Image (cartoon, rainbow, N blue to C red):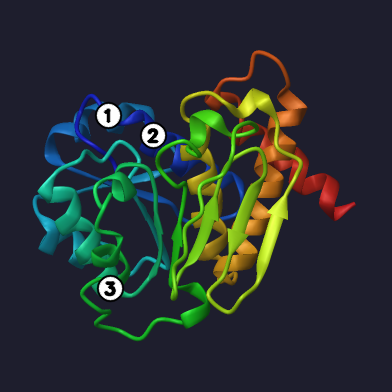
Amino acid sequence: MSGPALRTGAARLAARAGLRIGAGLVKVFCPPDAAMVLAPALEAVMLDVFHDADELQRLAAPMDAMIIGPAAGLTDATAANIAALQRNGAALVIDADGLSLFEGRAGDLVRGPGPRRRADPARRRVRAPVPGPAGPARQGRGRPQRRRDSRRCCRIEGADTVIAAPDGRLSVNRNGSPWLATAGTGDVLAGMIGGLLAQKMDSFDAACAAVWMHAEAGRAVGPGLISEDLPDRIGPVLGALLT
């Protein structure tokens, strides 16, 4: 889901990453003012306009996975859109503004309104990244924040990236790179996780796989990396895994 007209880059990064990692169809949902900005910038990615949370819920109902939060804005409308997507029951990646909006009241985000259609418990939610000192601008350095969530898969960034599942599974990814400490790389990672979830991967496995591949792509680019470099490095990383 895209933010307003001057905040569309994050959605484009996430969408491109979702395509590159294997999602068969990727669509960006945007508010009306963003449509004319996004339309000339998207090719293989589809586009749809929504006017309110109810319309977003209806339009997004066929999707297997959704990403919300990157540059969405810290507004009541973003909270309503998150609630609408939670009701759909699709696999949901909540990122960036979508988490910052619930700072100090994480329980409201965890509880949600409850899905209207049955969701696979293994594919419910991925919360990523955690806002604050362990956020995306500090991937590869700093100390991680600790967060617990009884029902959702959670990714926590710091010097190492920690992925935790409600069933007790825990993975620590140690191949992070300081080159990833730049704006937009977290949006690419959100798109990678969403793309794997759309292919019916378990949320914990999707987070683990995406984090590792994201770091490998960053290492391949090296010094001077900007977020736009990453989606086009996903293919070579996947190719190396398949040989």
**In the foreground, 145 or 62:** 145
* Secondary structure under the numbered disc 3 in the rendered image: helix
Q: Quadrant of residue 143?
A: top right
Q: Give the class, few, some or many, for how many residues have Cα within 10 Å of label 2's Cα (few <14, many ≥20).
A: many
34 to 155, vertically: above or below: above
Which residue corresponds to mark 3?
Answer: 111
Q: Which mark is residue 10?
A: 2
Q: In percent of the image, x 24 and y 73: which residue is there?
A: 87
What is the quadrant of residue 237 in the picture? Answer: top right
Q: Nearer the viewer, mark 1 or mark 3?
A: 3
Callout 2, which amino acid? Ala
Q: Is residue 38 above or below residue 65?
A: above
Q: Which residue is mark 1?
A: 7
Q: SS class of the residue under badge 2?
A: helix
x then y, percent, for residue 83: 21, 64
Q: Amino acid at mark 3?
A: Arg
Quote the CA–CA distance across marks 1 and 3: 28 Å
Is 90 drawn above or below residue 105 in the view shown?
A: below
In the displayed structure image, the side of residue 222 where residue 152 appears, left or right: left
> SS at mark 1?
loop
Residue at 65% across / 33% down in the picture? 140
Give the side of residue 22 with respect to residue 72, left or right.
right
Q: Between disc 2 and disc 3, whose residue precedes?
A: 2
- At a point 59% along the width and 33% down the height, the residue shown is 142
Q: Which mark is residue 41?
A: none
Tags 1 and 2 in contact by the CB under 8 Å rule? yes
Mark 3 neighbour density, 10 Å: few (under 14) some (14–19) many (20 or more): few
**Of marks 2 and 3, the one in the foreground:** 3
Q: In this orientation, does residue 42 appear? A: no
x%, y% of residue 85? 26, 65
Mark-to-mark CA distance, 1 and 2: 7 Å
